[in-house]
Amino acid sequence: MALVLAGCSQVTMLRTQEMKAVGTDVQVAVLSNLDSSVQYLSAQNDSLRAELDSIKSQMALQKRMMAEITMLSRRMGDESERNDSRQEEIIYRLDMLLGKSDKILAKKVVVSGAPQAPMSMDSLEREAEKLVEAEAMFNTARSDYHRGEYKLAYSGFKQVYEQMKTGELAENSLYWMGLCLIDVNQIDKAKKVFVGLADAFPEGQKACITMFKLASIYGTEGNVDMQKQYLQKILNSKNCASSAEFEQAAGILQELLEKDTPTPVPAAEGSEAQQQAPQQ
């Protein structure tokens, strides 16, 4: 019996050793597979990082190319505006010296009721040169404005206005001066310029849009009374009747008036309230 038990014990020990050996082999195989998987994933990660770096470099290159294209486009636009200004100047000079010379010479200045001689050619040429110079300065200032050089543009428009004082160029210069002041956030000065423009040129080309600008400024400031005043001026102006500002002013003024009008309480609600009140 003792021999049988000893034999069983030896068999059990052998099987235990075999199972341990098998377990060790399994662990080694699992670890080997895990190591292979880690290496594979690491290689995949490196590959993805390389692709991401490549994409980033391509995006950076595209951004640089877009920036260069934008700069070139702006330069081409500025050059185009300069060429347009030069062409306008040449056409204007030819128009003044050739096409309009007869009309200017035909005008006579009346002093003390007596007609004077027509303007001399020297006076005509000086007047034409003055207009051409002012037109060129105006176009340059407008180009400066579109490039975002608002202070420089304002100075140019102001110079044109001080040189002309009257006429279409003076009116347009005042209007663009106001726009420049708005863009540099000098609203009070812009209001003064627009008010002066509306007073000096009440029937000019910029009268309607100038009054609408003033109404918008006062509306932004919360000065509803002044906003209504300028909106009403637009509606009362015959020159603005067919303008886009007229329709916009009518709509805005209608909204303001509706806000000021209190909403009436229906009579039915009042009677129901009386019916629901407890009787004493």
Image (cartoon, helix red, strand yellow):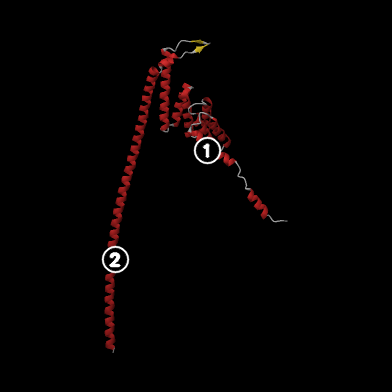
Earlier sequence position, callout 1 versus callout 2: 2
Residue at the bottom extreme of this rendering: 1
Q: Residue at x 57, y 41 (%)?
A: 258
Q: Please name the amino acid that badge 1 sits on.
A: Gly
State whether residue 262 is above or below residue 49. above
Residue that badge 1 annotates? 251
Q: Quadrant of the C terminus?
A: bottom right
The label nearer to you, 1 versus 2, is: 1
Mark 2: few, some, or many residues within 10 Å (few <14, many ≥20)?
Answer: few
Q: Residue at x 55, y 31 (%)?
A: 236
What x and y, as percent, mark residue 142? Answer: 42, 29
Secondary structure beneath dot 2 equals helix
Name the side, left or right, on which 126 lies relative to 47. Answer: right
What x and y, as percent, mark residue 225? Answer: 58, 35
Q: Residue at x 34, y 40 (%)?
A: 66
Q: Residue at x 27, y 73 (%)?
A: 22
Pick the residue in front: 127 or 278: 278
Count of numbered circles in the view: 2
Q: Quadrant of the N terminus?
A: bottom left
Label 1 and label 2: CA atoms lie apart by 79 Å
Mark 1: few, some, or many residues within 10 Å (few <14, many ≥20)?
Answer: few
Q: Please name the amino acid that badge 2 sits on.
A: Leu
Residue that badge 2 annotates? 31
What x and y, as percent, mark residue 260? Answer: 59, 40
Pick the residue in front: 134 or 278: 278
Secondary structure beneath dot 1 equals helix
State whether residue 169 is above or below residue 113. below
Pick the residue in front: 269 or 34: 269
Can residue 186 be seen in the rendering of this structure? Answer: no
What x and y, as percent, mark residue 7? Answer: 26, 85
Pick the residue in front: 159 or 53: 159
